[in-house]
Amino acid sequence: MTIELPADVTVADLPDWDEPPPGGGRISTLTEAIRRQAASRRSVLKLIAGGAMGLGIATLDLIPTRAAAVTPILSVWGDCHGFVDTSSVCVPRTAYYSSTVCNGSWHRNDSYHDSFVSYSYTFNNTSCSGRNAWKWFGATGAGHTTTRRKCSDGHTEYADIAQNRVSSFSICRTAI
């Protein structure tokens, strides 16, 4: 539906909200009803309470869910923090070192099973004096490595079809 307006109508010709229409027109009953209704204290308080409830419900959406509560916070020392071994970079030397225990630069926290073998990887987020990992920048001089590494601690268990089981302290050692 198209309304044809005369070409000479301008914005100044349009009526204001609080003035009656030009030419002796009558205000609609809906407009009259809205104008008669004053905002009471009760309606203002309802509006404020409704807005507060809306903000409260929206804020609840920002609270972490159960999945986030299960995931631990992994943290790293900025230096070796007393754990130094120039020959292996990360200590202890008896730990199992492999890229298979890594998930990025952190120790894995998952498992793998098939019909012949199973692996279980668990990180230890407090094994390094209350943290999971530390950065090691190496010593300088002859016989010392200068490789910059991050070592993230955990535990690895292996079992095969013949029931051979190996359980060991493991370290995800990555270059940084």
Image (cartoon, rainbow, N blue to C red):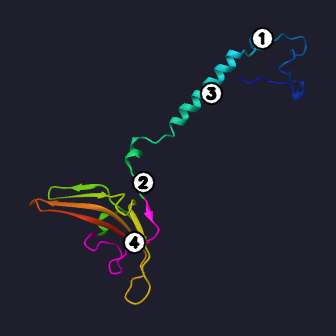
Q: Dot 2 surroundings within 10 Å: few (below 14), some, or many (20 or more)?
A: few
Q: Which residue occupies the extreme bottom position in the image?
A: 142
Q: Distance between the residues labelled 3 and 4?
A: 55 Å
Q: Earlier in the sequence, mark 2 or mark 1?
A: 1
Q: What residue type is labelled 1?
A: Arg
Q: Which of marks 3 and 4 is nearer the N terminus?
A: 3
Task: Name the residue that disc number 1 marks.
Answer: 36
* Amino acid carrying mark 3 in the image: Gly
Q: Are marks 2 and 1 in contact (CB under 8 Å)?
A: no
Quadrant holding the C terminus: bottom left
Dot 3 lies on which element? Answer: helix
Label 2 sits on a secondary structure element that is: loop
Query: Of the residues under marks 4 and 2, which one precedes in the sequence?
Result: 2
Quadrant the N terminus occupies: top right
Within-10-Å neighbours for mark 1: few <14, some 14–19, many 20+: few
To which residue does mark 3 refer? 51
